Amino acid sequence: MQNDWLFIGIFLILAPVFPGLALLIPRLIAPKKPNPLKSQTYECGIETYGDTWVQFKAQYYIFALAFLIFDVEIVFLYPWAVAFDQLPLFAVMEGVIFILILVVGLLYAWRKGILEWV
Amino acid sequence: MGDPINLIGDWLRNLMTGWGLPENLATFILTVMGVVVMASFLLILDIALVWLERKVVARFQDRIGPNRLGPFGIIQPFADIIKLLIKEDITPQGADRIIYNIAPLFALATVLMMWAVIPFAPTILGADVNVAVLYIVATGAVGTLGVIMAGWASNNKYALLGAFRTVAQMVSYEVPMVIALLIPVLLARSMGLQAIVDAQQPWFILVAPLAAAIFLVTSIAELGRAPFDINEAESEIVAGFHIEYTGMKFGLFYAGELLHALTVSALVSTLFLGGWRGPFVDQVPILGVFYLFVKAFLIYYVIMWIRYSFPRLRIDQMLGFSWKFLTPLALVLLILTAILDKAMEGATPLVYTLVMLGMNILLVWATVQVLRTYARVERRRVAERRPVATATEADFKELIGQE
């Protein structure tokens, strides 16, 4: 078990090294002749206008909120699924009721029109 | 237990301890070597995927594809790589330099990380941890972060739009995906992938075909491949998040996407198609690698087939498909699977599989009925006579500036 986590730890450290090496080679051999015109932001041939990092649609935020609630609650179900053999019928039903609460939440969000893209 | 990889590992360990190295150091060195071998193997496979992808897409589009360099154009990806390596690297004006440069690393590194927990054979796997499923979900989410970073840091409006769309898409499809992942976990009573493969006496695709389908669809959405490729829709936002990337940085995104597709295929085969299971695998463990990759490439082909056959979804259709169709369906499937599983404690595997399969088929039938009703209502709504324009003649005249 400890060795397994050692493997994952080393993998996490070494995984960015491989693409990093691939990025290092062009630094050595690729031409470098930047000029202001070349490094302009692409926008279909016209000059870009105004700031890029603008305020964005609030709808993205609402979807992110809905996701957060669901994902956090679903993570609670993983221990329930792993320990399924030890659970009596009562505990299984409790899990089902928990999922039903999720379903009610989804239906509520649906009725409220949160899931419509406007 | 005669498989060449463990044999070499044991031989090296004996060699190192024979030199007088302490046991811990030998383990560390072997682990580093294992990681390097695995990552190199995957990256070489990735190069092969470039060739495969180009060849197969060409056939789908009634072309021949790369055929000049080497037999069947096999050397083509190497030419591609050389071209990418010697291209000038352009950083757009006003880009957030650090994040802009880190983002491609994220795109490929996270995909590599996922392979740490996938079992290749009964005796060959990187890490047999008991939270592998959670680890996969987590690393997949970090990969999405790379896309968001790329889109945000490029200082380009198309890239930013692509990043926003990616966020909405990932966030929506993560929910049904995690629910679908719960079902093999529930059937195997474990979150370790090796344990899940061990538990697949009949493959889980027979016990939970619907969960496999949901997982495949949501995984394609996570990949950002057609029909869910609105984050890099060529006809709307040119190339989305990687629009400003040139040379090898773009190459890393491309390689990351291809390898991610293969990773997803390997995951589907591990979770639902029995992973390394196949004839004679208990006697000759190395065969497991072969079986795993045969299944993975089969799923990979299906993913490509879907990619080149379906038109792109609009963002409202895409979000609706996840929240109004896949999520409720996955939740109902989870409830039914849990109750039936508990009710059939002690049943023979045959009865168990048949009942589960029957439940899945019934659920699909019910879903199709609901969808047909919805389609009928929708058709009626669309077919109704609707006012084309509500403006009166006076309004119209005002609009065009006549009195």
Image (spheres, coloured by chain):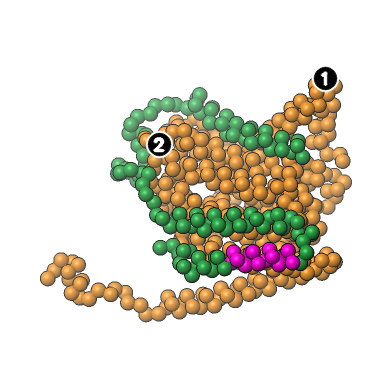
Chain colours: A green, B orange
User: Residue farthest to the left?
Assistant: B403
Could you tell whether B310 is left or right of B136 in the image? left
Residue B177 in view in this figure: no
Q: Residue at x 47, y 33 (%)?
A: B98
Q: Which residues are magenta?
A: A90-103
Residue A58 placement (x, y as % from top left): 41, 55
Towards the viewer: B42 or B14? B14
Q: Secondary structure at mark 2?
A: loop
Q: Which residue is mark 2?
A: B95
Residue B249 placement (x, y as % from top left): 50, 36
Residue A49 in view in this figure: yes
Asked if the stretch drawn in magenta spans residue A93, the answer is yes
- In the rendered view, would you say A55 is above or below A117? above
Total marks shown come to: 2
Could you tell whether B191 is left or right of B72 in the image? right
* Dominant SS type (magenta): helix
Q: From the image, which quarter does the C terminus of chain A lie in? A: bottom left
Whole-angstrom CA distance, mark 2 to mark 1, is: 52 Å
- In the rendered view, would you say B257 is above or below B178? above
- The chain holding disc 2 is B
Q: Amino acid at mark 2?
A: Ala
Q: Residue at x 67, y 35 (%)?
A: A9
Q: From the image, which quarter does the N terminus of chain A lie in? A: top right
Q: Amino acid at mark 1?
A: Trp
Towards the viewer: B283 or A15? A15
Q: Residue at x 46, y 48 (%)?
A: B163
Q: Which label belongs to residue B19?
A: 1
Residue B20 placement (x, y as % from top left): 83, 19
Asked if the stretch drawn in magenta spans residue A50, the answer is no
Q: Residue B45 occupies which quadrant of the picture? A: top right
Q: Residue B343 occupies which quadrant of the picture? A: bottom right
